[in-house]
Amino acid sequence: MLGDHDGIATIAVKSVKVARQFYEGTLGLKGAVSEMGPVVIYKSGNSKVQVYESQYAGTNRATAVSWVVGDDIERIVQALKAKGVTFEHYDAPGMTRKGDLHVMGTFRAAWFKDPDGNILALSSR
């Protein structure tokens, strides 16, 4: 039923203005493809990321969005750190840490938060 339709990552934020600075300036998402009041939709690769104002911003305690960045993960982590992003460190079963990367075999991942505390992730696959 839904397998032939695109999904969209949806992130609640306290302020779209503040979120735009982070998602556009820090993460490099390109200009909004759609704006409807307190809702901004970005194109991200072949998918979309929707940012909207909500009183529940930052209450999700799980990963809200993951970007698969392949072998560029280490370079992207360093570039985000240079922009002031702080990476989260978790004790995940079967994973070891190499700096800010969590490693399991050839799989690598890194987690960080947006200004509202939403958990975002990068992975190698």
Image: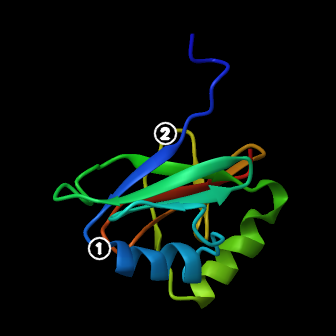
User: Would residue 84 be visible to someone looking at this image?
Assistant: yes
Q: Is residue 20 left or right of residue 99?
A: left
| Place of residue 5 in the rendered image (x, y in percent of width and height, measured from the top left) | 63, 25
Rendered-image quadrant of the C terminus: top right
Badge 2 density bin: few <14, some 14–19, many ≥20, Cα 10 Å: few
Badge 1 density bin: few <14, some 14–19, many ≥20, Cα 10 Å: some
Amino acid type of the residue that numbered disc 2 sits on in the rendered structure: Pro
Residue that extends furthest to the front in the rendered view of this protein: 36
Residue that extends furthest to the right in the rendered view of this protein: 71
Element type at mark 2: loop
| Place of residue 81 in the rendered image (x, y in percent of width and height, measured from the top left) | 58, 83
Q: Nearer the viewer, residue 125 or 47?
A: 47
User: Would residue 109 be visible to someone looking at this image?
Assistant: no
Element type at mark 1: loop
Which residue occupies 51% across, 50% down?
A: 65
Return the residue at label 1. 15
Return the residue at label 2. 93
Q: Nearer the viewer, residue 106 or 45?
A: 45
Comparing marks 1 and 2, which lies closer to the viewer? 1
Q: Is residue 91 left or right of residue 100?
A: left
Amino acid type of the residue that numbered disc 1 sits on in the rendered structure: Ser
